[in-house]
Image (cartoon, rainbow, N blue to C red):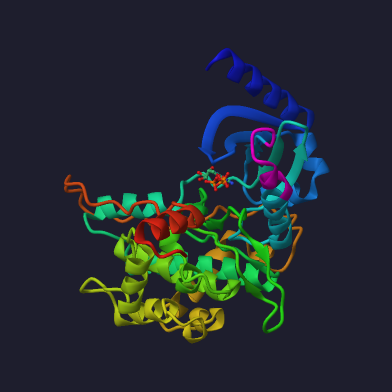
Amino acid sequence: MKSSSRHTFLEQVRECWDKGYLLSSKKIGSGTFSKVYLAYATHECIQNNPKLASDLRGKHHTMVAIKIISTAKAPPEFSRKFLPREISSFNATYKHLNVVQLYETYQNSERSYLVLELADRGDLLEHINMVSAQRYSPGLEEEEARRLFWQLVSAIAHCHNTGIVHRDLKCENILLDDRGFLKLTDFGFANQAVTGPKSSLLSTFCGSVAYTAPEILMSKKYNGEQADLWSLGVILYAMVMGKLPFKERQPHCMLHMMRRGPTFRPGLSTECQDLIRGLLQLCPLKRLDLQQVATHCWILPSTHTFFSALLELAPEKLVDEEPDEELKTPRPFLQSHHLQWQGVPQERLASGHKPLESWLRQSADSAGLGL
Ligand SMILES: Nc1ncnc2c1ncn2[C@@H]1O[C@H](COP(=O)(O)OP(=O)(O)OP(=O)(O)O)[C@@H](O)[C@H]1O
């Protein structure tokens, strides 16, 4: 570590200590203007923070993730617009088992700190690639995809019910924790959905190209909830196919592919195909809504599994916000698959990370589309 970075890191350690957190040097992720470190909450800090106390009680550890954002280095718009949005979306979506919890924030003139629930088993993209390599077959087994997808649908339903549209749903923004629970994060592009027929239409380009709904690619005004549902279709496709459904360099090629619709591998159940097709409907009004997704015949069996696992994990959590009994030992939610490793690398599911706005401009310029 260079001496300037060491100095900065030590300052961060001190600033976290002042708030009751022991910042470790273990970096667990980084974003454009942020670094995320593993940290430990002190006993005193837990006692003084009801959110932290309530959440850590069921976890048998004191670990948290601290996201440190260099606000001094980020463009002013980031601190003025995106960071407050991220914080207010986290606050609005508190508390759901499948959404990362924000416990507290603090800042100074250089940095902002977000103390977050830890979900340190990697993201969904890494998980799909790891399982695909183990199975020597792209994608997750349908049963595992169903269990994870149900949790994602539940997280999105919670966000939409609290008036938040995510607008950047992708495998990289879906984390897994040590109990196998899915945790939705990264609300940097989220928006408060204004209810009412027309007032809810948005016009900002955001998200990552491969997950973006066609109406946004076509620069139309869009409904944020319906756009999130398209992204859900892309994520489910990635889960069961181990690749993205539409990936093209030029917007018109991408739209052409979208019009033709997704193609599936032999052996994928017709129910799963039907659900994906229902979500990847070009016309937003024809797209399935969340209620139709949650009651789709492919997804319904997971409801039972999910609630049984939840009850076993923490029966009192379903009825009592402040459980005072010790929680039972959790059963692993995701079961490992004992499939043969054959040693030949598969094509990996690539990140669909490229931000939409820059991609649209570049592609439109090169295609002479003038979008
Ligand atoms: N709560 C968490 N628990 C564990 N790891 C996390 C957590 N939050 C973030 N990370 C890790 O840190 C990385 C960056 O976090 P995040 O995506 O929130 O940052 P960002 O600044 O919004 O990123 P970007 O600029 O790419 O949008 C994530 O990809 C993930 O690997």
Q: From this viewpoint, is residue 308 visible?
A: no
In the image, residue 256 above or below residue 329: below
In the image, residue 142 above or below residue 182: below
Q: From this viewpoint, is residue 152 visible?
A: yes
**Side of 75 relative to 308 (left or right):** right
Residue at 32%, 65% in the rendered image: 141
Q: Quadrant of residue 92?
A: bottom right
Q: Farthest residue in the bottom direction? A: 286
Query: Magenta span has 76?
Result: yes
Q: Quadrant of residue 261?
A: bottom left
**Side of 38 relative to 124 (left or right):** right
Residue at 69%, 50% in the rendered image: 102
Q: Position of residue 337 (x, y in %)?
A: 31, 56
In the image, residue 216 above or below residue 354: below
The quarter of the rendering in which ligand 1 is drawn is top right
**Side of 131 relative to 306 (left or right):** left
Is residue 98 or residue 360 the one in the foreground?
360
Q: Quadrant of residue 183?
A: bottom right
Which residues lie in the magenta part? 71-80
Q: Farthest residue in the top direction? A: 3
Q: Position of residue 3 (x, y in %)?
A: 58, 13
> How many marks can you see?
0
Is residue 204 or residue 50 the one in the foreground?
204
Residue at 17%, 44% in the rendered image: 343
Q: Position of residue 142 (x, y in %)?
A: 34, 69
Residue at 42%, 82% in the rendered image: 278
Q: Position of residue 295 (x, y in %)?
A: 50, 83
Query: Magenta span has 139?
Result: no
